[in-house]
Image (tube, rainbow, N blue to C red):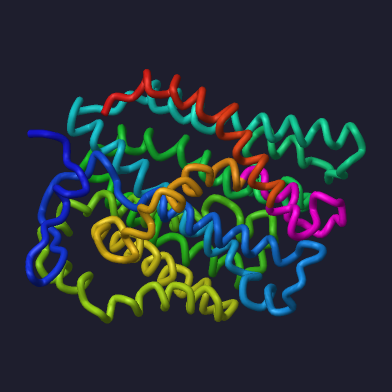
Amino acid sequence: MPPATAEDLMSTDTNGPRIVPRALPTHIPSLDGLRAASICLVLLSHTATSRGNPIPWWDDVFGNTGNFGVRAFFVISGYLITTLLLKEMAKTRTVSLRDFYVRRTLRIFPAFYVFVFAIVGLQAWGAIQLMPGDLLAAFTYTMNFHVHFSPYVGHLWSLAVEEQFYLLWPLTVVLAGRRRMGWIAAGVVAFGPVYRTAVYVLRLGPQIGPFTFPAVADAIAIGCVLACVWEWLSGQEWYERWLGSRWFILIPLAAYGFHRFRHPLLWRLGEETLCNLCIVLTVDWCLRFPRTFIGRLLNARPVAFVGTLSYSLYLWQQLFLNDSGYFLATFPQNLAAVAVAACGSYYLVEKPFLRLKRRFERV
């Protein structure tokens, strides 16, 4: 049977797009578009602090969208990595940990360490000032456990979380197997609110606070759960009808509402989990309905291109989207500087290593 494509995942009749029970897709439609939407939320949020931003209400509207965009990135990462692992297991009956870690290293490390060494050079030149421990936390992917960080590297906390996930999850999959991996991911989702509530109620402090791996791993794990139940959901008529309902629009609105109007205790007790659930359902809708207006928008070439640049955009944006007052950190030239730096990172660093990475792909 030929590899599944976006067309294989959908069939069209007089009632519109329909889900059909098929295997996990080889090509994942809308993925780059979802990455583009996520990185735009981050950029909009961090632009709020830029010197020279002439829009007075910018911070009120977009000031907190950055964390929402990062949350979406976590969900997408969990779904994507688990989908690739499941496909490899279906084809080879196992997962090559060596090949996985080599692929992740080639995908993540080159662009990341080019950025970090650029930060080292800028500090040596006197252009920026880092906090004690910043470079150690950056080099070791432990920024999420580093409490006091400078704005130039603080955003690396989310990349540290993802790298810790890449380290732990494939090993868990190999040891647990296909049947138990989904339950383990679901257990991580259930553990998240318990951990966050305990930290908040007991006032355990920022060292084990909101950016640490146990505090945010459930956002990644819920994407893993989606990948594990994807084929089963594809055969459920009730799920098909619900996704196709006009009322589904309430799900992404609820996700943003939970995030925007959160209560300190209720957020930790369960609102954050509900927010993650709404995000993962929205992601699944976008993946399954690429022929809708939203789907076509997410798959449009300009949008997909921004998604392709999303990793480099995320790496370099904080160097320019801050309130330092430097010329290249002032609105609107800071947005142009981010775009130039991201394109340079992608074409000069990421892309050559992506070609090398394909030698270790097994599916």
Name the one closer to the observer, 346 or 259: 346
Residue 175 counted in the magenta span: no
Q: Is residue 38 left or right of residue 325?
A: left
Q: Is residue 68 left or right of residue 253?
A: right
What residue is at 13 percent from the left and 63 percent from the top? 18
- As drawn, 37 above or below 256: above
Q: Where does the C terminus fall, quadrant-wise? A: top left
Q: Is residue 18 left or right of residue 27?
A: left
In the image, residue 157 lies at what x, y percent? 63, 48
- As drawn, 61 above or below 305: below
Classify residue 251 by image quadrant.
bottom left
Q: Where does the N terminus fall, quadrant-wise? A: top left
Name the one closer to the observer, 191 or 85: 85
Residue 329 counted in the magenta span: yes
What residue is at 67 percent from the left and 40 percent from the top? 341
Name the one closer to the observer, 331 or 230: 331
Q: Is residue 247 left or right of residue 3?
A: right
Magenta stretch in the rendered image: 315-335
- As drawn, 98 above or below 328: above
In the image, residue 87 lies at what x, y percent? 23, 36
In the image, residue 327 lies at what x, y percent? 85, 51
In the image, residue 46 lies at what x, y percent? 68, 61
